[in-house]
Structures are given as C-alpha cells and as structure tokens.
Image (cartoon, helix red, strand yellow):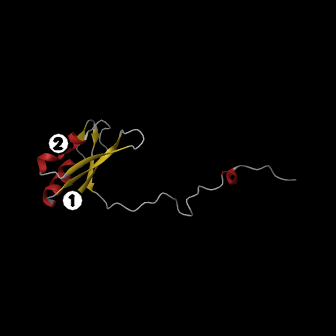
Amino acid sequence: MKKIYVGNFSFKMTEPELRALFEPFGSIESASVATDRDTGRSRGFGFVSMPNDEEAEKAMAALNGKESDGRALTVNEAKPQTQRSGFREGGGRRGDRNTHQRREPRW
C-alpha cells in the first residue's frame, strides 16, 4: 500500500475528482482532500492510497508536474505523519507579551 501526497491543486477540487485523476493508473483504496477545520474549505492538497506499489509509482511519475485547472500538481510519496502535541516546546507558552515591548530608559 502506497500513500501519495498530491499538492498544489485547485481549492475547488473534490474527493471524487481527485480519485478520477488517479483511476486510469490502477485501483484506489482511498482519496481525501485536506480541509480547513474552521471553514471546511479545501487546503489545496490531499492524499491518495493505492494498494499496488507499481501502479502508484506509475501514477506519481505521470501526474507530478501535470497541469490541473491551471496549476502544476506536486505528486510524490507521502512522508509518515509525525506525532504532534498541542503544546509548543518549553511548556506550550508563547511567552509574556510584555517582554517584547519597548521600554523607556530609566535616567
């Protein structure tokens, strides 16, 4: 099973359209368009999973750089997802906002 990253596509692209883009190259396990969690709008990238590695390689080679709706697609093997936490390093605080304010010199 190969998971493929597909980027730089139109914000209007739907999951069925993404699936249709890859279907000529073989069977598709899943196709998903990443959406903004607040607005629900497309973020311009998504993922396609293909069970046959050889078919996936052919699809990546054929579709990388291909123009779709006036945009050159970026198509390559997806990198493994890294574990993300809700906090930033150092306790998750962004720091005291007052530390960045300019202070008048004391004379």
- Residue 86 at x, y percent in the picture: 48, 57
> Which label's residue is closer to the chain start, 2 or 1?
1
Image disc number at residue 75: none
Three-letter amino acid code of the residue under disc 2: Ala
Circle on res. 2: 1
- Asked if residue 37 can be seen in this view, the reply is yes
Residue 96 vs 16, above or below: the answer is: below
Residue 36 x %, y %: 39, 43
Mark 2: few, some, or many residues within 10 Å (few <14, many ≥20)?
A: few
Of residue 71 and residue 25, the one placed in the foreground of this image is 25
The residue depicted at 12 percent of the width and 52 percent of the height is 27
User: Which residue sits at x=76%, y=50%?
Assistant: 103
Query: Horizontally, is 80 left or right of 64 in the view?
Result: right
Could you say which is closer to the camera, residue 101 or residue 30?
A: 30
Q: Quadrant of residue 39?
A: top left
Q: Is residue 24 above or below residue 91?
A: above
Q: Which residue is mark 2?
A: 20
